[in-house]
Each structure stands twice: as structure tokens, then as C-alpha cells.
Image: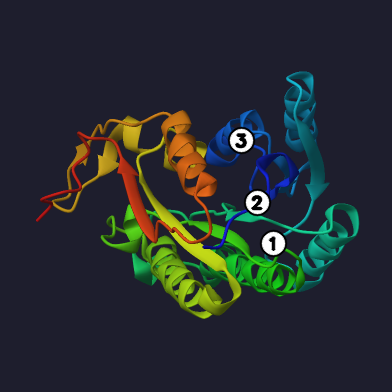
Amino acid sequence: MTSSPEINTRTALITGAGSGIGRATSCALAADGWQLILVGRRSEPLETLAAEIAGRGGSAKAWVADVSKEASVRELFVRTRSEFGRLDLLFNNAGISAPAVAIEDMHLKDWEAVINTNITGTFLCTREAVRLMKEQRPRGGRIINNGSISAHTPRPNSTPYTVSKHAVSGITKCTSLDGRPFSIACGQVDIGNAATAIGDHVSQGALQPNGTRQLEPTISTVHVAEAIRYMAALPLDANVLTMTIMATGMPYVGRG
């Protein structure tokens, strides 16, 4: 059996940590004794969160990085290796969406922004995490990717985001397969209607496939964080490959 290091020595890196699901997950993991590396493009929310965690007796570093940039990600993981010596958990959470427009009206810059953050960012962070997890002793670690129910079923006018989340599912499966010999577990949480800025439109009237708009229920990011907290706590010989957590009443299951 492959076991994880003691929980008080474990280090987690969370991208997109300054708000929403990343923030809630950071708080949940801090409560379990994880050392946290909080990553995002803006320092202020990261520093605020790190101070809150420290005020509750936790340990968190606030580091600015752009996951869509190779040099920035490399520097991030060099710093992780230098200051912590190892990485036990990577939560690939950083993600953006594009304006909800028909594909023929989609600007290339909006497409590229989503692809560069959601796909390339996940790839770059995963690549560096796998390198570190293979070399560190004890060897191994866990990677959790933030997917979406859009990895399975699209919303209208959501081509860039939907494509990106389908790709994240591919990265998850490949990493899970290729990581097996090295005690690297990889799973994905597919989230539906969490109450975040990126999903705010659903509570204001989301466009439905029949052309109507419908108010949809949402769930607290705390519930999503608890799901990730469970996945993160597993020993490395157990893995949640995919988990869907969603608002019970949202029009997803059974949609025609």
C-alpha cells in the first residue's frame, strides 16, 4: 500500500485561489493542516486570504503567477521545490469563460484566452507537478482538476468553455494513467452551478436550449470545497477519478 506523508507535512498548491472555489478550498484544506501555496494573477486577494488563514493558525504563502505562461509556471514550481521541498497536492482550479455568443460571432482573442488558461494552464501546471512528484521522496502526490458539467453537456453559446473542459477531462485521464507507476493519482471534480462570479449568470436567468431564459438554483462553494477536501484526504492508493457535484434542481439531468 502506498501511503501519503503525515498530514501536517503535506503541501498543496491551488491555482485561482483568490476567490470562489479556490478560496473556499484553501480554507477547507487549511483547516486540515495543509501547508498552502495560494496562486493567482492578483496579489491583493491572495495576501488577504493568506492572512486570514494565518490568523486561524494555518500556513499559507501568496504567490502571483499566470498559469497560461510557461515561464511563470516554471518559476512557480522552482520556487515550490526550493521553499517546500515537495508538493503533495495540486488543485488546477484557475479558469475563465468567454462571452456567451454564437460561434460565428466569437472573437479569436476570447477563444484563445479561454484555451490558454483552462487547457494550457492545466497542462503546464500538471507537467511541472508530475516532474516534481516523480523526483521527491516519498515519491508521488495527487492532482485534482476543476472540470465542469460542461465537460459532458454544453450550454448554448459556450464553445470555448465547453471545449476547454472536455480537454481537461482528457488531461485528467492521461495523467491518471501515466501517473500510476509513480504513485501519482489524478482526479477531476465536475461542478454544476456553484455560486461564483464565473457562474453568476445562472441565478439571473440562464439561456436554455429552447431559447428561453430560466433562473437556476446554485450551491455554495463550501460544498464544492468539501468534495475536494475528501478527494485530497485519500491515501494515494485510492482515487476519485471523477466526481460531479451540482445543484440538485438545476436543469442538467434529463435535459433534451
Q: Position of residue 28 (x, y in %)?
A: 57, 32
Dot 3 falls on a residue whose secondary structure is helix
Mark 2 or 1 closer to N-term? 2
Seen at 47% across and 48% down, the residue is: 231
| Quarter of the figure that contains the C terminus | bottom left
Relative placement, left or right, of 29 versus 151 is right
Mark 3 or 2 closer to N-term? 2
Residue placed under numbered mark 3 in the picture: 23
Q: Spatial distance from mark 1 to mark 3, Cα to Cα? A: 17 Å
Q: Spatial distance from mark 3 to mark 2, Cα to Cα? A: 10 Å
Depicted 20 relative to depicted 69: above or below: above
Depicted 132 relative to depicted 157: above or below: below
Task: Report the front residue among 74 and 60.
Answer: 60
Three-letter amino acid code at the position of disc 2: Thr
Mark 2: few, some, or many residues within 10 Å (few <14, many ≥20)?
many
Three-letter amino acid code at the position of disc 3: Arg
Residue placed under numbered mark 2 in the picture: 15
Relative placement, left or right, of 66 versus 243 is right
Report the disc number at residue 67.
Answer: 1
